[in-house]
Amino acid sequence: MMHEFRRAKRRKASDTILVTDAMTERVVGRLGNLSESGLLLMASETLVDDALYQLRFSLEDGGGAQPIEVGAHLLWLDRASAPAVVWAGFRFIAVVEDHARRLRNWVDAPGSHYE
């Protein structure tokens, strides 16, 4: 039996949610799943392990897609089965309160699927 050790539940992204490096304005991949404290990115760009990033993505909240920006620490990288794609795990280190509230609402929305 598999035990889950994550502290925060992670909502699976059912739609394509592109993630942009806010410093370079380049799309670095798409969201795999998201929690209040971090995200799984399916990266299509080269990332630096153990680096800090400023990431931006938009979440649908019933009133349209609202942008969220987070400071994040890249914890790990793992090659995916698809060519030129890498799984990347990020931990949030800086999120303004309004964006944190919207993250929580999105993760806890009715009908969400969790990993």
Image: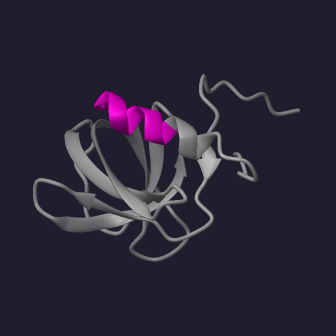
Expressed as whole percent of the image width and height from the top left, the position of residue 36 reads: 49, 33
User: Residue sitting at 15 percent across and 64 percent down?
Assistant: 25
Expressed as whole percent of the image width and height from the top left, the position of residue 10 reads: 61, 41
User: Residue sitting at 29 percent across and 37 percent down?
Assistant: 72
In the picture, which quadrant includes the N terminus?
Answer: top right
Residue 38 appears anywhere in the view: no
How many numbered discs, if any? 0
Q: Residue furthest bottom?
A: 83
Magenta stretch contains residue 93:
yes
Q: Residue furthest front?
A: 63
Left or right for 80, reference 43: right
Look at the picture and state if 65 lies above or below 109. below
89 or 17, which is in the foreground? Answer: 17
Magenta stretch contains residue 12:
no
Left or right for 109, reference 53: right
User: Residue sitting at 46 percent across and 30 percent down?
Assistant: 37
78 or 111, which is in the foreground? Answer: 111
User: Residue sitting at 25 percent across and 54 percent down?
Assistant: 47
Look at the picture and state if 113 lies above or below 1. below
Expressed as whole percent of the image width and height from the top left, the position of residue 84 reads: 39, 74
Expressed as whole percent of the image width and height from the top left, the position of residue 89 reads: 44, 43
Residue 6 sits in quarter: top right
Look at the picture and state if 78 lies above or below 76. below
Task: Name the colouring of the figure.
Answer: one colour
Residue 8 appears anywhere in the view: yes
In the picture, which quadrant includes the C terminus?
Answer: top right
The segment highlighted magenta reads 91-103
Residue 70 sits in quarter: top left
Q: Residue furthest right?
A: 1
